[in-house]
Amino acid sequence: MTYAGGVSRDLLNARALGMFAVLLGVVAATTLLGLWQLGVARDDGRRESVVAAASQPSRPLSEVTAPHAAFTAALSNRAVTVTGTYAADRQFLVVDRRLAGRSGSWVVTPLVADTGGTVVILRGFVDGAPATAPAPPPGRVEVAGTLGPSESSTSGTTPLPAGRRASLDLAALVNEWPGDLYNVVLLAAGESSVGTAGVTPLSPAGLSRVPPPDPGQPLNLRNAAYAVQWWVFGVFAIWMWWKMIRVSPPDRFEPVAPREEAHA
């Protein structure tokens, strides 16, 4: 019998099949352990990005990102300021939201920045879905807050009346609004009027500020390395099994035939 034939015969042997079943168990275990470590890496990365972003001093938005730039994990929860003029005619509500046990809507208003581009400002939360949301302040304003990402599209949902949306989807807004759009949502923590007399803080009536959302999920490199380590163990187990099969003599796993006794 050829060597290749011997290997094929070993693969079909009962003991070899048992070893293969053990191999499958080892590979399944290492795969699941690797996925678990990857999940831990993402969770740790989320917490680390919150701490890192919160520790950064507030900076002008134009120094942190640019219109149409990708939203990265480093932008989550980043404190920024931006000065410009609200486009009140494009303000809308994002319905079916909750805040501290209350049901209501987000008030979202575009701000045309002095440095160019439009910024989506989540000005606050209102109870229910009022026909008329609190109007934004006129003139130049400075908005301070933290950055968050766009929401996913809700295509296929029941159409809503004008001025109301089911999600804060920047991909839809970029096709509807003129000019360049920043790929961020600025959750307003404070608004100030900017005039010749200086900056005057504003207190919009009827609005509750919305806290920052969960940031993105950058990987914690240590736990990600552990995940790769588990998967390498799985590949190593496959290699060891195959090596044992190839180096075994053809009759290694075969039962020994009974010896015939000599007759006088």
Image: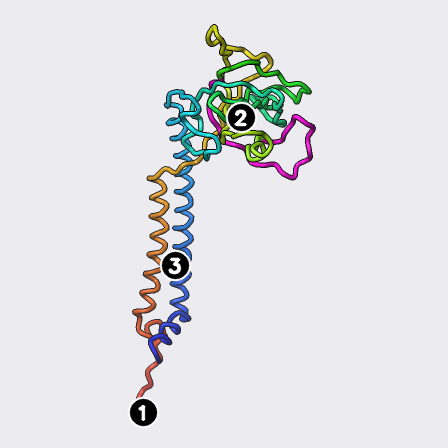
The x and y percentages for residue 73 are 42, 33
Q: Secondary structure at mark 3?
A: helix
Residue 135: assigned label: none
* Residue in view at x 42 percent, y 35 percent: 43
Residue 141 versus residue 53: which sits nearer the camera? 141
Outermost residue toward the bottom in this view? 264
Q: Is residue 120 magenta?
A: no
Residue 263: assigned label: 1
Q: Earlier in the sequence, mark 1 or mark 2?
A: 2
Q: Quadrant of residue 109?
A: top right
Q: Magenta-highlighted stretch: main secondary structure?
A: loop
* Residue in view at x 41 percent, y 69 percent: 14
Query: Height in image: 33 above or below 101?
Result: below
* Residue segment shown in magenta: 143-167
Q: Earlier in the sequence, mark 2 or mark 3?
A: 3
Marks 2 and 1: in contact by CB < 8 Å? no
Query: Height in image: 18 above or below 209?
Result: below
Find disc 3 in the rendering and name its residue. Answer: 23
Q: Secondary structure at mark 2?
A: strand
Disc 3 versus disc 1: nearer the observer? 3
How far is the residue under mark 2 from the one under mark 3? Answer: 54 Å
Q: Is residue 150 magenta?
A: yes
Q: Earlier in the sequence, mark 3 or mark 1?
A: 3
Q: Secondary structure at mark 1?
A: loop
